[in-house]
Amino acid sequence: MTDIERTEFNVQDSPYASSGGGFGQGGREVDARAQFEELDAESNLRPKFLGEFIGQPKVRTQLDLVLAGAKGRKVAPDHILLSGPPGLGKTTMAMIIAQEMGTSLRMTSGPALIRAGDLAAMLSNLLEGDILFIDEIHRIARPVEEMLYMAMEDFRIDVIVGKGPGATSIPLEIPPFTLVGATTRSGMLTGPLRDRFGFTAQMEFYEVEDLTKVVTRAAGILGVEISGEAAVEIASRSRGTPRIANRLLRRVRDFADVHAGGVIDLGAARAALIVFDVDELGLDRLDRAVLTALIKGHGGGPVGVNSLALAVGEEPSTVEEVCEPYLVRAGMIARTSRGRVATVRAWEHLGLQAPPGTLGE
Ligand SMILES: Nc1ncnc2c1ncn2[C@@H]1O[C@H](COP(=O)(O)OP(=O)(O)O)[C@@H](O)[C@H]1O
Ligand SMILES: [Mg+2]
């Protein structure tokens, strides 16, 4: 199915592409390493194999079986949907799937697929066993989605050539491929699209213990000296999210470089997190703005997400996809049929007394 030349991540076609690409010779390890050196700080920290992926034990076990089954039968794995809030490792996992299967990854995203032709172009370039990664798949346009149904199910699409009464449809065969979709809003996927995925991996927020491993691993890669306590401190303020853990680590490193001789101990970590506006629970400025709008602006709710978004000057989708999942998981807000409601914890977090009858008393 594949040869060694195709084992590197094939990101040339992607909206995330960096320059360069094809390293042919030298084998898989070297290729992958060379490719990764070109990518930014975040990518350097991405685990490359399933065994290196920290946390998400359920997803790892399930995915391991799906991939091993496909390898054993020498077929492309079923289409896979990765669902969960931003920064939990969906893109990383898509790359790992390609790496584990020894195939290429082609990356695109829902918003980039506007016309059916955009998708047809991607599909017609696929080789057998390739992984097609569509990020934010809940944002693809309707005609694209319909073409995707057929491609996923029958590895075939109809390409419309010409316009008006003279238009004809030409069937085009696609080599068997695996679609990996990522979404922060699986609820926004239509039923038919969701049904065409053979496996859905639901990524959950990470426990502090796992995030501590993420921080320690990243510090090792970055060559930063960090104490165990400091790693736990950063981990516990990272909103259950590896991307945030890595970002906080880089900011704390900046602080430690300037003020602490480059060594991150607990004191340096705490001082740095104050400078960067991260509170004890890891809530950032936007999280606190949402809580403040909900409590001080609307008496604790219920209030609709659109009003909240307006109050904090963000898109409703940002509030819904970035802020709320963690605030809900932290027990700060509840989603009710009438809108968002602040809990006692949220009031207390802002240093306020919750009125009688508040949720979570
Ligand atoms: N399980 C993990 N172990 C270590 N690092 C991780 C893990 N999951 C994510 N990361 C790191 O977090 C960052 C964001 O991950 P990414 O896959 O881009 O998230 P998503 O696509 O879900 O938004 C990456 O830089 C990656 O290094
Ligand atoms: Mg991503």
Image: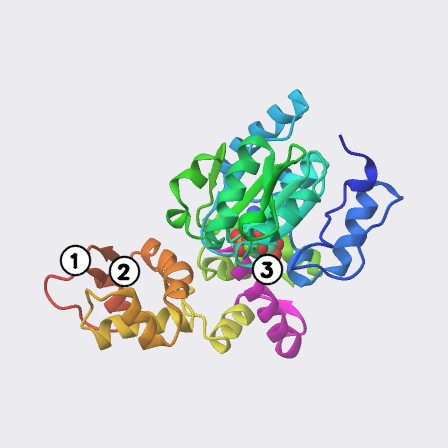
Residue 17 numbered tag: none
Q: Which colour scheme is used?
A: rainbow
Give the crowd class for mark 3: few <14, some 14-19, many >=20 residues within 10 Å.
some
For marks 1 and 2, the one nearer the N-term is 2
Query: Is residue 350 visible to us here?
Result: no
Which residue position holds label 1? 361
Q: Magenta segment, which residues?
A: 241-266
Helix, strand or loop at label 2? It is: strand
Most foreground residue, 101 or 247:
101
Looking at the image, residue 33 sits to the left or right of residue 41; the answer is right
286 w.r.t. 211: above or below: below
- The residue shown at (60%, 24%) is 69
Most foreground residue, 288 or 279:
288
Which residue position holds label 2? 333
Q: Position of residue 356 (x, y in %)?
A: 10, 65
Q: Position of residue 272 (x, y in %)?
A: 53, 73
> Residue lying farthest right?
25
Which residue position holds label 3? 227
Looking at the image, residue 305 sits to the left or right of residue 58; the answer is left
- Which amino acid type corresponds to the residue marked 1 in the rendered image? Glu
205 w.r.t. 307: above or below: above
- The residue shown at (53%, 32%) is 153
- Which amino acid type corresponds to the residue marked 3 in the rendered image? Ser
For marks 3 and 1, the one nearer the N-term is 3
- Quarter of the image for residue 53 reads top right
> Residue lying farthest top?
73
Marks 3 and 1, how far apart at CA: 37 Å
Give the crowd class for mark 2: few <14, some 14-19, many >=20 residues within 10 Å.
many
